[in-house]
Image (spheres, rainbow, N blue to C red):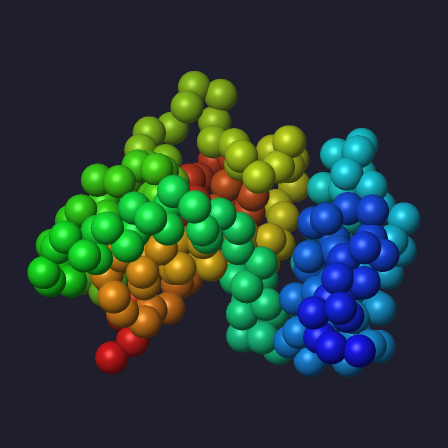
Amino acid sequence: MDKSNITRQIRESYSSYKVGDLAVKLYLAGISQEDLDYILQDGKSIKMKPYDKLQAYLAQAMNRMEERLPMDKAIAIRQGCACCLVGKRDQLAKAIYKNNPTIESRFEALSKERYIIGGKAWKGTDGYYVSYWSAKPVGGYYCPCLKHTPTEPMNKLWCECCAGHIKHHFETALGVKATCQCITTILTSCGEDACLFRLNIVE
């Protein structure tokens, strides 16, 4: 059976596409069946609703990933779970690359494209920064990927999918290869801190 059929069967075996997508990424990364079963234990019984149960399950799955996998591997897998990589955002990023001649002018154009970066972006002394928020809402920051802001800190691995998202569009818009690191996140701070990512161009 070819790999595409295997991944399709894996996805279809889970009721929640979020759990199914994580299962596929773990499989494609060559994670052993023993570790995969441990990380996704009872995952096939998890549905999209009620969402608080799904959220709690995914939080526990991130903890199990950290327990079983080297952190660099776990981060790479979670960044590979990034969504919204095609469509309008991809078209905008490609247009930025095409219409601006230098890396700095491309980053300046990217920093103004709210549909990709969300809040604000700037260049620091140690890299390029992107925050999905430009100001703190009255009720505190909230994650659009989850229904509920946690009352206890969640594992930062959950947020690496967003790091993968901005990394992809940053690389496309600037025409570079880069690394992306989560500095602060809403979920690890229970809504006190905005999501902040640092990107560094790989020479």
Q: Determine whether 197 is above or below 6 in the image.
A: above
**Is 47 in front, or is 184?**
47
Q: Residue 76: which quarter of the image?
A: bottom right
* Left or right, 44 with reference to 131: right
Pinpoint residue 156: horizontal percent, then vertical percent.
56, 55
Pinpoint residue 167: horizontal percent, then vertical percent.
39, 59
Q: Residue at x 63, y 48 (%)?
A: 154
Pinpoint residue 197: horizontal percent, then vertical percent.
38, 54
- In the picture, the quarter occupied by the N terminus is bottom right
* Left or right, 66 with reference to 173: right
Residue 65 visible? The answer is no
* Left or right, 198 with reference to 39: left
Q: Residue 38: which quarter of the image?
A: bottom right
Q: Residue 114: which quarter of the image?
A: top left
Q: Residue at x 75, y 34 (%)?
A: 51
Q: Residue at x 41, y 23 (%)?
A: 137
Q: Residue at x 46, y 52 (%)?
A: 85
Q: How many labels does the image show?
A: 0
**Is 104 in front, or is 24?**
24
**Is 76 in front, or is 197?**
76
Residue 40 visible? The answer is yes
Pinpoint residue 33: horizontal percent, then vertical percent.
82, 77
- In the picture, the quarter occupied by the C terminus is bottom left
